[in-house]
Amino acid sequence: MSNNTTMIIPGMENLARLDSRVLEERIHQAIQDGFRDIEIIAQGQHGIGGRLWQTGREPVRIRVTGTSGQRLGSMGFPNTTIDCIGSASDDVGWLNAGAEIIVRGNVTNGTGNAMAQGRISIAGDTGARAMTMTKHNPRFSPPEMWVLGSVGDSFAEFMAGGIAVICGHGSPRKDNVLGYRPCVGMVGGKIFFRGPHQGFSEQDARLTVPDDEEWLWLTGGLRDFLRRIEQEDLYPHLASERSAWRLLVARKPYEKVGGPARKMSAFRKEVWDKNLGTGGLIGDLTRIDMSHVEVITRGDLRRYVPLWENEKYLPPCQAHCPTGIPVQKRWELIRKGAMDEAVDLALKYTPFPATVCGYLCPNLCMDHCTRRTVNWPSVDITQLGKCSLEAKPPERAPETGKKIAVIGGGPAGLSVAWQLWLKGHEPVIYDSQERLGGKITATIPESRIAGKVVDHELKRVTDRIQWVRLSAPLNQQEFKKIRDDYDYVVLAAGAQKPRMLNIPGIERAQTALDFLKRAKHNDAIPGRRVVVIGAGNVGCDAAAEAYRLGAAVVTLIDIQEPASFGKERKAAETAGATFLWPRFTQAISEQGVVLTDGEILPADMVIVSIGDEPVLDFVPAEIGRQKGFIAVDAYFRTTDPRVFAIGDVVRPGLLTEAIGAGCTAARMIDDLLKGREATWDRLPAIEPERVHLEYYPPEIRPGESATACAAQCASCGACRDCGLCANLCPEQAISRVPAEGEPYEYIVDETRCIGCGFCAGACPCGIWRLVENTPLE
C-alpha cells in the first residue's frame, strides 16, 4: 500500500556527502516501503530519480532541492515525476524512457540525450547538444522537450524522433534561440520555436510553419507546460501571435538527394542489369547469378548470427564453488515456488549444506557473483544455507554391494562417504576421535557455528553410514589388511601434526590446534596478553577465542602480509586483535616473543599457528609422497590404483575444497566400479559482461529472506523465459517452442533473422551470443 507521507532523504549524513549509489539505494528502499512522495535534499549526487522500475503500479513524485548532480532522471521510467527546484547539471533525462522531468531553472549540456519516451520541461535555457539522438517508437507517445528560454549549440544533432518546443522567452540569447549549427544529422522529429535564429543544417531540416492541427497541439501543450513550471501568466504572450512560431522538420531521404527515390525495379533495370547482366561489363564472362542482393541480408548472407546458449556456461557462482553446488539453480527453484526442492538439492553435493554453506564457508560463490562487477552486494547464499538444516536426502541409487574404506572422519572423509552412499555403495569410515567431523567439531569455535547445527548434520550421516571407531592409530599392517578387504580405500586422515618453530624457548609455546581443542571445552586460560605467531585464519580463530576466554591484548605476527580473510579475520579484528608484519621470531622467553630486531612482544601465552602436516606412518612406502603429503593425480588417485587420497592429507585447504575433493574422488570410484569411462568435461564460466544487470535492483538488505534473495539473482547463463528477445526482435525471427527433454527453447528463423544482435544486446541473463556466420559449403 502507498504511503501519502512525504519521505525526506538528505544527501548528507554525519557531515559527509552520501555517494550517489547510496542515495539511489535509499530512494529505492523508500519506494519499496510504500512512500510515493519523496523529497531529496541533494548535494550534487548523480542520477536522482532514474531507474525507478517499481513505479509501474503507482505514480511516484520526486522533489529535488539543494544541488542536483549530473543525469537527473536518467533512464527514467513511466509514472515517475521528478521536480527539480532550481537548475540542474549535464545530461538531464539521458535515455529517458517515460519519466516526467521538470527543472525550474537552467540546465547544462546533453539534456534529453537519446531519450525515447517521457517529457522534459525547462523553465530556463539549456546548454549544448540538447535533444540529440532522440528516437520515437510508434507504439508509444513521442518524447517531448519544452524550453521556456533558448537552447545551446549543436541542438537536435542526429535527432531521430520526438518533439521539441523552444519558446525563446527571457533568454539572454536574444539574437539566436537555436544556438550554433542546430539540426546536423537530423532524420526525424519536429522542432517548434519562437524567436530569431542564425541558421540550421538545411541539408537535414527544412523550415515551415505549423498547420492548423499542429498549432492546436502546440497551444494546448503550452498551457500544460506553463502550468508545470508555474508560469501560467505567460500563456497570452506566447500563444497570442501564431505568426511568431516556426517549425523545423527533418527532410525525407529523397529530399536530401534532390528528387524522389528511384524504385528498386527501375534501379535493377537501368543500373544493375545494364552493367552486370547480358551485354554489360562482365555479362558475357560468367554464368554466376548476378541477381541483386537485398540491402538487409538474411540466411547465409548474414555476417553475424545469434546463438541461444542456454546453460552452455556455468554461472560464476557455481564455477567458483569447490563443491560444485548449482547455486543459481537453487535460486531458480525458489523463484518457481519450489523452496523444498531448492533446499534439498544441496545434499546431492555436500553432507554439510547448513554447517558449511550457512556458517563456515568463506563463500567463494558470493565473492564471484556477477553483481560484484558493478560493486553491488552479492546474493546472500548463507540465507539459503541456513535453510538447509532440514534438507531431505535425495533418493539413493540401487545398492551395488561394493565396499569402500574411508580412513578419517573429517569434512573430506564424510564428503566422499556421503557421495559413495548416494551412489549405492557401502562406505565404512575409520576414525579414532570421539566425534566425527574432524576440525569442524574439534577446533572451530562455537562462536562461529552452534554445536546443535553440526550435531544435526552429523547425525544425518551416521544414521546411514557405518563408522568404526579405532582404539589406536592404524599401522601399516592394519592398513594393508583394510586395503585387501575393500574394493577401494580413501585416505582422508587430515593434517594432525602442527608445525613448530626451531627456536630457543619453543617449549613455552603451544600450538593453535591444541589451544583451540582446549578452548572448545573452556579448558584454556590465556592470561592477559597473548601473541599468536602466524596470522592465517586458524591464528585468527585462536585470537578470537583468546579474547573470549579473558585475554585483554592479542597480537598476531607474520613474516608476510597475513593470508587470513573472511569471517575469521573479521572476528579477530572485531575482538580487538592487532596484526603486525613482517615480523621474524628469534626466541620465546619468559617476557614474551623476542623478534630478530631485538623487540620483545610481552606475552602470558604464545600460540604457534604456522600450519599442520599429516601423520603418514601407517601409509605403505609404495604410496608416493610429495613434500610430506600424499601425491595424487587430478582425480585424487595415488600411485596405488586402489587407494585415493583427499583433503589436508594431500594439501592444506578450505573446508569446501576438502568436500569438493570428496565429490571428485567418489565420482571417479563410482565410474571405476561400474565400468564406465570417466567423462569430466566441465563447462566454462560465462563472461560476466554478457549479463545485463540493468534489469535487476542494486540493493540487497542484510538478512533478506531466501525468497527475496532469489529475486536478485541475475540467472547468469540460464534462461528466465522472459520472452524479451522474441518481443524485441524487429523481424519477429525468434520464437519459443517446446523441446524434447527440455521445457522449452528459443529458436531463430534464418529466413527472417538479419543478424542485428538486438537479442544478445538485451538478454538479461546473457543467453544469446552473436557470432560470425560460417555457413556450411
Image (cartoon, grey):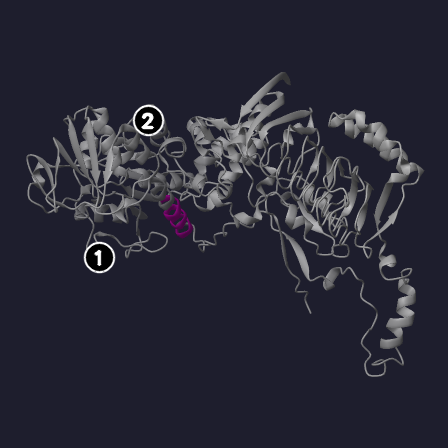
Contact (Cβ within 8 Å) of mark 2 with mark 1: no
Q: Which mark is residue 60?
A: none
Q: Is residue 202 left or right of residue 760?
A: right
Q: Name the quadrant containing residue 457.
A: top left
- Number of numbered discs on residues: 2
Distance Cα–Cα, label 2 vs label 1: 38 Å
Q: Quarter holding the C terminus? A: bottom right
Q: Measured from the top left, where is residue 343 in percent x and y?
A: 48, 31
Q: Residue furthest right?
A: 212
Q: What residue would you read off at disc 2?
A: 455
Residue at 30% across / 29% down in the picture? 574
Q: Residue furthest bottom?
A: 285
Q: What residue would you read off at disc 1?
A: 622
Q: Is residue 603 left or right of residue 758?
A: left
**Magenta segment range?**
662-672
Main SS, magenta residues: helix
Residue 402 visible here = no
Residue at 71% across / 47% down in the picture? 132
Q: Measured from the top left, where is residue 714 in percent x and y?
A: 56, 39
